Image (cartoon, helix red, strand yellow):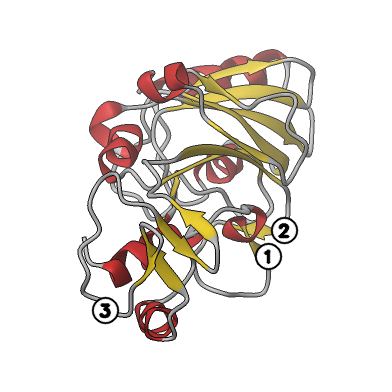
Amino acid sequence: MRLDKFLTETTDLSRSDAKKVVHRGDVTVDGEVVKNTARAVKDGMRVEWNGEHLELMGLRYLMLHKPANVECTTKPGLYERAHDLIELPNVERLSIVGRLDVDTTGLVLMTDDGQWNHRVTSPKKACAKRYRVTLARPLEGDELARAVEDFEHGLMLDGEEKPTRPARLEMETATVGLLWITEGRYHQVKRMFAAIGNHVEALHREAIGDVELDPELEPGECRFLRPEEVASF
């Protein structure tokens, strides 16, 4: 790997800035100052920038406890971005694995492993997501029974040509319940409850597949996934 590319892979430097620091003599390879940006960096070589030892990172897999009013986007906007909450080098290279609406809270996965991202999000995999839903008005009795049946058989949403995939609904109280879905249409959960005449007041994602949101994570905090969590997909 070229030295300038190595720097962009291990720091937040752009390619042009990486060339500048090399030309200034700020970078050493195995203890010697190198000003050639095309210098090959091989396994076992020690690269330092201003005395800091730089190492290539492996693939990264994280979970984030997303707060409300945070956007799952790479573009600057009206709200803080999920990426802004992650204090890691080259954070922009992390992709969000299953986005959440700006007002929805809970589990967000992030990775720079494109194949793993595809395994989690591909419609063919039908990966289940569990949400805790708070409703505007009570859902109980016969109305609840109809809703459970409608969700199991699939709902036709406005503007859609196909019904939703079978979903599982379990109410814990008259207004708070758990919903399992295996797809991710635009505002799907909110639209599903709107289709049965209710309104979602709050929405929180608790799990994706077998990966549960870590109860130790406060809103805005993140951690790396454990090997068994990564391997569960």
* Place of residue 80 in the rendered image (x, y in percent of width and height, measured from the top left): 68, 65
Mark closer to the observer (2, 3): 3
Q: CA distance from mark 2 to mark 3?
A: 45 Å
Task: Classify mark 2: helix, strand or loop.
Answer: loop
Sequence-first tag of 2 and 3: 3
> First in sequence: mark 1 or mark 2?
2
Q: Which residue is mark 3?
A: 36
Packing grade of label 2 (10 A; few <14, some 14-19, many >=20) is some
How many angstroms separate mark 1 from mark 2 (CA)? 7 Å
In the image, what residue type sits under mark 2? Asn
Rendered residue at 28%/40% (across/down) = 118
| Numbered badge on residue 80 | 1
Q: Which residue is mark 2?
A: 69
Q: Secondary structure at mark 3?
A: loop
Q: Secondary structure at mark 1?
A: strand
Left or right, 167 with respect to 136, comes to: left
| Vertical comparison of 93 with 165: above or below | below
Task: Tell me if residue 66 can be seen.
Answer: yes
Dividing the image into 4 quarters, which one contains the C terminus? Answer: top left
**Image position of 75 with respect to 16: above or below:** above
Choose between 1 and 93: the one closer to the eye.
1
Can the viewer see residue 198?
A: no
Say whether marks 1 and 2 touch (CB < 8 Å). Answer: yes
Of 164 and 48, the residue lying toward us: 48
Which three-letter amino acid code belongs to the residue tagged 3?
Asn
